[in-house]
Image: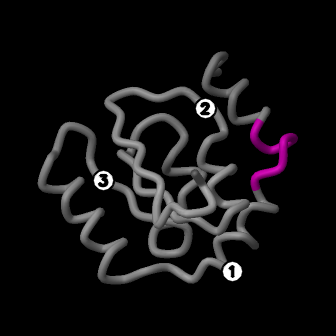
Amino acid sequence: YFQVADALLLFYTYATPSGVESIAYNFGIPVVATRVGNFSETIQEGVTGYLAEPGDIRSMAEAMEKIIHQPLERSKIEKHASLLSWERYSGSILRTLFPS
């Protein structure tokens, strides 16, 4: 499904790292998500996707409109995927599970 997707929508009120956005990036697919969990760390606004406020339907709609009317360059998204290595991502998971 990733091969034919135009975007990955992840509208949550709470999220823990699963790595699904890095899978999308490997396919050059932008991610539109709510600003929860680690999404603000893994989604570069206007480069790899757009962020919306959780629970704010208008904000979510605006983010979806952006991805439709301002498509992002897939090659830049694929390049960003290399920044989401397992080493970096596992550190993010540990910080979420065991905040200092």
Query: Mark 3 sits on what residue?
Result: 52
Q: Amino acid at mark 1?
A: Ser
Q: Is residue 37 left or right of residue 70?
A: right
Q: Amino acid at mark 3?
A: Ala
> Of the residues under marks 2 and 3, which one precedes in the sequence?
2
Q: Nearer the viewer, residue 100 or 10?
A: 10
At a point 54% along the width and 40% down the height, the residue shown is 38
Magenta span includes 98:
no
Q: Nearer the viewer, residue 54 or 2?
A: 2
Provide residue 84's location: percent of width, then percent of height: 76, 53
Q: Among all residues in the image, which is located at the extreme top?
A: 98
Q: Amino acid at mark 2?
A: Pro
Magenta span includes 87:
yes
Q: Nearer the viewer, residue 98 or 89?
A: 89
At a point 30% along the width and 53% down the height, the residue shown is 52
At a point 34% along the width and 41% down the height, the residue shown is 11
The image shows residue 87, relative to residue 60, as above or below, that is above
Query: Mark 2 sits on what residue?
Result: 17
Q: Among all residues in the image, which is located at the extreme left?
A: 58
